[in-house]
Amino acid sequence: MSKEEKVKKPFYKKWWVWLIAVIVIVAVSSGDDEEVDTVEGEEAETESAEVEENNEEEAEEVSTEEPAEEEEPAEDKTEFDVGEQAELDEQVVTVTNVEKSQGSDFDQPSEGNEYVIVEVEIENHSDETISYNPYNFKMQNSDGQIEDIGIITVDSDTSLSSGDLASGGNVSGTLSFEQPIDDEELQLIFEPGFWSGEQIKFNL
């Protein structure tokens, strides 16, 4: 070999070999980044799908739940006991006492009957003046007979009269009826007025 002849460089020292190596490295790196982005995108899509599915399931559960039943309003009470206040047309009525009597020397019930004397109190809870009257009260017995108050003198000093009550006023008095002896199903009926059509009852 002549000294003047140049020695060839090994191929891996040539410039185009390094250029190819750089291009390959860059290409591999780009591929890895795209793969990471793809994986992250797939994970995000999966999470979004799971959230949407959960929301749909919750919506289905809500839609399939039976609506709560509405509570029916309680019916107005129409029967009361002795000592219990009852309100009708803004009048509060209370039966405060019940007594039985065989009358007096001048006034006695018919055979098999007795006098039933009921003490009542009336309060005006309205903003206007109201009228009260003993004939707003009747009594019903176990035979279903409904009777007005009687003309009885045993309670003449305490009997309820008729009149007017101002707003917030009250009045009390007794009502006398003639009924079968020891009738355990007696009821006092109160109707606030002839045209009212409403009534309440007191179990005596």
Image (cartoon, rainbow, N blue to C red):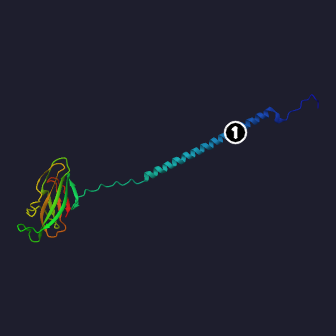
Left or right of residue 8, residue 149 in this image:
left
Identify the secondary structure beneath mark 1.
helix
Question: Measured from the top left, where is residue 136 in percent x and y?
Answer: 14, 56
Residue at image point 13% right, 61% down:
175
Q: Farthest front residue?
A: 157
- Identify whether 130 is placed above or below 152: above
- Identify whether 143 is placed above or below 131: below
Could you classify mark 1 by the number of other residues whose Cα lies within 10 Å: few (under 14), some (14-19), or many (20 or more)?
Answer: few
Front residue (pair 112, 8) = 112
Quadrant of the image containing the C terminus:
bottom left
Residue at image point 17% right, 61% down:
188
Front residue (pair 134, 10) = 134
Question: Measured from the top left, where is residue 105 in percent x and y?
Answer: 6, 68
Quadrant of the image containing the N terminus:
top right
Front residue (pair 76, 156) = 156
Q: Farthest top residue?
A: 4
Residue at image point 46% right, 52% down:
61
Identify the residue position indicated by label 1 in the image. Answer: 29
Front residue (pair 171, 163) = 171
Q: Farthest bottom residue?
A: 112
Question: Measured from the top left, where is residue 106 in percent x and y?
Answer: 5, 67
Label 1 amino acid?
Answer: Ser
Question: Measured from the top left, where is residue 8 in percent x and y?
Answer: 87, 32
Q: Farthest left residue?
A: 106
Q: Quadrant of residue 40?
A: top right
